[in-house]
Image (cartoon, rainbow, N blue to C red):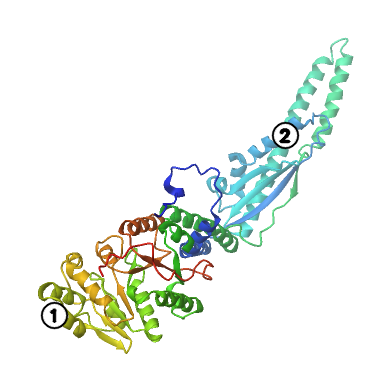
């Protein structure tokens, strides 16, 4: 009995110590490359277009130096200097400063300057940066320099006013003490302080100096199309990878043929590349059909009736059936193909023949008139595509295909096919999952070939397929994996000569 494997996504097993399934993630990225490419193209192109469409802005910087050595008679500890720098940074963008700048620049106002001017302090030096932005390079430099000059002028004026007031106060004190007896020492101290203020007045405003005037920038600060596009590309690639992995988690797919075989309990008989590569008839495709042909040739003539089925209806099953039958016929094996997918027949379209009369007509005649009438109709319905390749079309459309396939006439037809002079009878049947037609045919066939698309089949569907085969006791010859990229895995080989594990359901 097939052992049902434990699935990592079942949520019942502790996965803390399990290794990262790198092959699955790589497979998910390979499968999701169209989504990744779409995300990259959309985001990169959008950012590039927006960068080119947005108006350009220029940034210019003027630098003010605070020389803490200028005030020789004032404290210069680190905390005091830091607070003075923070004070200057705040005062640079006050309305008084911006109002004076607005008077010098007729196209600006206090409101517009508030959005264009910023001040920052260098953490490693006594430097205050005045950064101005504008739609014109010359305008940005002009604004930054105007703010710096206006602030320095205001500071120098304020410092001189402060010193003048202090001198006036000291002079008044000296005049008041001049007529008092015993005040010589006090007057001398005040005169000493007055001399110090004279020195301070001479150097008023020298603590703050324009260290570097702003220059018109040579290129805009924003937008930068090249830089933005590069950043957008890498960000989009990262998001695309996340999206591909998320899609794989939401709708998981098989990582490869090995997992398909493990979940179904059926060996891989052949691996076919994607459809685009099969059109070029590459070496992998030829080797796959040679393996299938060799497997069928090893079956005895008592097991000539082979059902080619699939898990679902999107597995390219009919293409594989026709191609395999053509390979057998070209090898000299007289082969009959029966289009038994009565709901969506495709064999007729692939071979360019009409759908009726065919299988449904033969089954109805067998049920109504017996073996002799059906045998004659069977011979009349078979279409000879080549000397060794014959086809029985699906026949007249039936309103109840499941009821037709479940009747005794189907078993009788299979017995007739066993006794026919065809070396191989390939039946293109319905899928095993979703409809009952496929399981009904599987109960009658002597061997099964199951076509599965790796990129369409989910792990849960593969496990369900294995359960169906186990319940049917279907004689599965092997799996045909479609969509396998790269070389054929080493474990893909020829099926055993006989399918001994499953008893035949056909009466002798």
Quarter of the C terminus within the rendering: bottom left
Q: Is residue 375 left or right of residue 151?
A: left
Quarter of the image for residue 180 reads top right
Residues at circles 1 and 2 in contact by the CB criterion of under 8 Å: no
The reply, left or right, for residue 299 in relation to residue 421 is right
Q: Secondary structure at mark 1?
A: helix
Of all residues, the one furthest to the bottom in this rendering is: 387
Classify 400 as above or below 21.
Answer: below
Taking 459 as reference, is 75 above or below it?
Answer: above
Is residue 151 found left or right of 353 in the rendered image? right
Q: How many numbered marks, from 0 up?
A: 2
Residue named by callout 1:
373
Q: Which residue does the numbered mark 2 point to in the structure image? A: 82
Q: Position of residue 239 (x, y in %)?
A: 51, 56
- Residue at horizontal 49 percent and vertical 41 percent from the top: 14
Q: Is residue 42 visible?
A: no
Mark 2, other Cα within 10 Å: few <14 / some 14–19 / many ≥20: some
Question: Tag 2 or tag 1, which sits nearer the N-term?
Answer: 2
Lateral position of residue 427 relative to residue 268, left or right = left
């Amino acid at each position: 009995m097939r052992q049902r494997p434990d699935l990592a996504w079942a949520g019942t097993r502790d996965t803390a110590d399990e290794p990262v399934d790198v092959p699955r993630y790589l497979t998910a990225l390979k499968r999701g490359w169209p989504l990744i490419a779409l995300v990259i193209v959309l985001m990169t192109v959008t950012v590039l277009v927006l960068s080119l469409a947005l108006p350009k802005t220029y940034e210019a910087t003027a630098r003010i130096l605070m020389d803490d050595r200028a005030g020789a008679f004032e404290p210069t500890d680190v905390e005091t200097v830091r607070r003075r720098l923070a004070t200057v940074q705040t005062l640079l963008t006050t309305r008084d400063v911006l109002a004076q700048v607005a008077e010098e620049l007729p196209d600006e106002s206090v409101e517009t300057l508030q959005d264009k001017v910023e001040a920052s302090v260098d953490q490693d030096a006594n430097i205050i940066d005045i950064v101005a932005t504008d739609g014109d390079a010359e305008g940005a430099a002009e604004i930054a320099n105007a703010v710096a000059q206006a602030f320095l002028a205001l500071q120098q004026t304020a410092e001189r006013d402060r010193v003048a007031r202090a001198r006036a106060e000291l002079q008044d004190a000296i005049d008041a003490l001049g007529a008092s007896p015993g005040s010589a020492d006090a007057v001398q101290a005040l005169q000493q302080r007055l001399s110090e203020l004279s020195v301070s007045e001479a150097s008023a405003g020298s603590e703050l100096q324009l260290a570097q005037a702003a220059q018109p920038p040579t290129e805009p600060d924003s937008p930068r199309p090249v830089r933005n596009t590069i950043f957008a590309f890498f960000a989009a690639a990262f998001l695309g990878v996340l999206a591909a992995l998320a899609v794989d988690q939401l709708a998981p797919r098989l990582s490869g043929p090995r997992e398909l075989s493990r979940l179904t309990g059926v060996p891989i008989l052949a691996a076919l590349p994607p459809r685009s590569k099969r059109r070029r008839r590459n070496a992998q495709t030829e080797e796959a059909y040679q393996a299938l042909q060799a497997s069928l040739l090893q079956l005895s003539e008592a097991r000539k009736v082979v059902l080619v089925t699939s898990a679902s209806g999107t597995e390219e099953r009919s293409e594989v059936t026709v191609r395999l039958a053509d390979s057998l016929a070209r090898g000299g094996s007289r082969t009959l193909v029966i289009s038994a997918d009565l709901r969506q027949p495709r064999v007729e379209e692939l071979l360019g023949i009409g759908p009726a009369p065919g299988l449904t007509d033969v089954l109805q005649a067998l049920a109504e008139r017996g073996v002799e009438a059906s045998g004659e109709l069977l011979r009349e319905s078979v279409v000879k595509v080549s000397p060794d390749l014959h086809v029985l079309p699906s026949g007249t459309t039936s309103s109840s295909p499941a009821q037709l396939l479940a009747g005794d006439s189907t078993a009788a037809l299979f017995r007739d096919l066993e006794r026919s002079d065809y070396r191989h009878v390939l039946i293109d049947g319905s899928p095993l999952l979703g409809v009952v037609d496929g399981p009904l045919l599987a109960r009658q066939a002597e061997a099964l070939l199951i076509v599965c698309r790796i990129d369409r089949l989910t792990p849960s569907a593969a496990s369900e397929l294995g359960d169906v085969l186990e319940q049917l006791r279907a004689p599965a010859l092997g799996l045909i994996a479609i969509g396998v990229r790269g070389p054929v895995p080493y474990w893909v080989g020829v099926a055993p000569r006989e399918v001994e594990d499953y008893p035949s359901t056909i009466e002798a």
